[in-house]
Amino acid sequence: MEGRYWFDNSLTEEGARLRLLEAIADPRSIRLLEDLHVGQGWRCAELGAGGGSMALWLAHRVGADGSVLAVDRDVTLLHHLVDHPSIEVVQSAIEDLDLPAGSLDLVHTRNVLMHCDTADDIIGTLVEALRPGGVLLLEEADYFPVAGMTSSALAEVASALVGRWTWARTMPGTLARLPVVDLEVTMDTSMLQGRSPEAAFWTHTFRSVEDRLTEPELAAAHGIRPVRQVTFDEAMVCLTDETFWTPFSAVVCAACRKA
């Protein structure tokens, strides 16, 4: 995963980037989890816990009789959760995680499996980790809307970073071949507006990897075609212009229960 995931939780600015993402994505995650009736006493795993907002929400939801396993490959941003009585913080790549079969009531991922080369195999192990009737909720981004962007500069910059993240569209088919029932799939997509919270998140994201996108040697090392600095700067201007609107990303949300 580290070869495909460009961001480092140990960096100070990464906390700010993830807080922006939480503000954008948490309302959707909470709505989906409430619809799945997550309740008191549940044993949950939040995989790719990031800054910990969803792990903390789950801990409040399951109460003192429940538990939350908060897993991330770098737990720098989860230190505030280590003393919570219902949360266990674990540092591990999702590929290396050993979850006992039938041990969990809920597994949740958000923007995690999309970075894994073995995502389909991982989904199989996550289903195995659920008790019969246990819930799997996957929220993973797919960037096919980039092809319809209204700015060629932003499309070039975005494609360099996210153009390879197209696995999520295959996720429902993978789940359909596993021992699950009640599979429901939705797609969350909207237009991105300049000078919005989402635009701030993407500005922060692109700025954090600007050298890898624009410097030829670094870009080549990451297997991408370098973006000219003038193109990068033009894209960043778009994200600060409140009159700018464009399609950008889509999130495939798949929920099911173990048969």
Image (cartoon, rainbow, N blue to C red):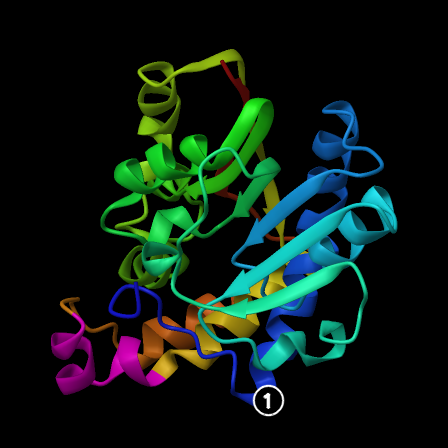
From the viewer's side, name the closer residue of 223 and 155: 223
- Is 173 contained in the magenta span? no
| Camera-side residue of 62 and 195 | 62
Estimate the x, y position of residue 23 in percent, counting from the top left.
74, 57
Work out whether residue 63 or residue 215 is closer to the camera in this orientation and state it.
Answer: 63
Name the image quarter holding residue 38.
top right
User: For residue 191, what is the image quadrant?
Assistant: top right
Name the residue: 52% across, 78% down. 9
Q: Is residue 8 left or right of residue 75?
A: left
Question: Measuring 15% from the left and 67% from the top, which residue is drawn there?
Answer: 225
Circle 1 residue: 12
Q: Is residue 158 above or below residue 191?
A: below
Q: Which residues are magenta?
A: 211-222
Q: Is residue 26 left or right of residue 119?
A: right
> Hey, which residue is sitting farthest top in the picture?
182
245 to the left or right of 231: right
Nearest the viewer among 18 and 93 is 93
**Residue 80, relative to residue 129: is it above or below?**
below
* Residue 122 image offset from top left, x and y in percent: 33, 42
Magenta segment: does it hold 221? yes
Residue 78 visible in the current orientation: yes
Q: Is residue 253 visible?
A: no
Name the element at disc 1: helix
- Within 10 angstroms of label 1, few (less than 14), some, or many (20 or more) residues? few
